[in-house]
Amino acid sequence: MCDRCDHRLSVGFAPSRRGLLLGASAMLMSGIARAKENKKPPKPQNVVSPDAALARLKQGNERYIEGVTRRHDFAHEREALASGQNPYAAILSCADSRIAPEYAFDAGRGDLFVCRLAGNFANAESVASLEYAVSVLATPLILVLGHDACGAVDATIKSLKDNTTLPGHLPSLVEGLAPAVKAVSGQTGDVLAQAIKQNVIDAVAKLKSAAPILSAAVDQGKLNVAGGVYRLRSGKVDMVA
Ligand SMILES: [Zn+2]
């Protein structure tokens, strides 16, 4: 994270008698207010509504599919972003190397705040990261991004079906993905595809209702949470939530 982020967080979470009384949420909001007073957005074109942010992601994905991605001015972007960031969308994506959100949405540096973990489910750390994006960086959109043939979802299906425990820390992925897999277990057809879609839908619902920060931003119309599945063959992101 950049120096600016560290500063903002340190302002938001600096221990004080008043802060202790207000609680962590109020402390964070206090830090945001002070940070915003001092800061112009480094990318003014990223100050958009939730609907405009989603439209921009879709337009970027169309360019990616057609192979007409924009040329990105890395030198100019580096200069603009040296003092801060204001991404127009946050992405909760699988860690799968074939997805690459910046490519899939033809986005530049400073455009997407990307949280990645195998299975793209909303755990405490990913929710906290997205709370930072929304409350400190004023990001108006979160997109949960699953994908075809997700190995983490597939391993969870097999682990639950065979009643086996995976080695190392892998059971934590199974724990995070099990609710979606169990929810579609009675359905016929492609169970993996259904579980991938259900997992995205579940994460969207969890993020929308995550109190106090994300749920409040949704209620105030400052944030939209959407979900999509990336198609490995075409590169298209099909919206599912
Ligand atoms: Zn995956």
Image (tube, grey):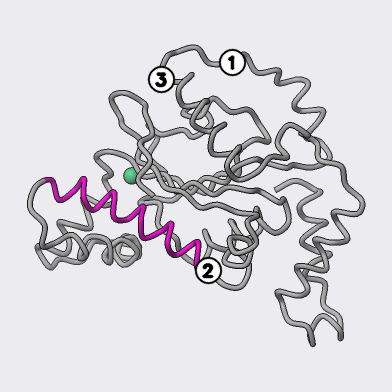
Q: Find out whether the residues at labels 3 and 2 contact each other: C-beta distance under 8 Å.
A: no
Which amino acid type corresponds to the residue marked 3 in the rendered image?
Answer: Ile
Please determine whether, in this image, residue 233 is positioned above or below residue 218.
above
Q: Find out whether residue 163 is within the magenta segment.
A: no
Q: Residues within 10 Å of mark 3 (few under 14, many from 20)?
A: some
Foreground residue among 78 and 169: 78
Residue at 41% from the left image edge and 58% from the top image edge: 203
Tell me residue 191's x, y (percent): 15, 51
Please determine whether, in this image, residue 124 is positioned above or below residue 81.
below
Q: Please indicate whether residue 161 sits to the left or right of residue 8 in the image.
A: left
Residue with the mark numbered 2? 210
Classify residue 220 by image quadrant.
bottom right
Disc with the residue nearer the chain's start (1 vs 3) = 3
Q: Callout 3: helix, strand or loop?
A: helix
Segment tinted magenta in the rendering: 190-210
Residue with the mark numbered 1? 70
Which amino acid type corresponds to the residue marked 1 in the rendered image?
Answer: Arg
Q: Please indicate whether residue 82 sits to the left or right of residue 73 in the image.
A: right
Tell me residue 129's x, y (percent): 59, 57
Tell me residue 83's x, y (percent): 84, 40
Q: Callout 1: helix, strand or loop?
A: loop
Question: Rounded to the nearest whole Å, what is the CA distance between mark 3 and mark 2?
Answer: 33 Å
Question: Rounded to the nearest whole Å, what is the CA distance between mark 1 and mark 2?
Answer: 35 Å
Disc with the residue nearer the chain's start (1 vs 2) = 1
Residue at 22% from the left image edge and 53% from the top image edge: 155
Q: Please indicate whether residue 92 sits to the left or right of residue 156 in the image.
A: right
Residue with the mark numbered 3? 65
Which amino acid type corresponds to the residue marked 2 in the rendered image?
Answer: Ala
Question: Rounded to the nearest whole Å, what is the CA distance between mark 1 and mark 3?
Answer: 12 Å
Q: Find out whether residue 198 is within the magenta segment.
A: yes
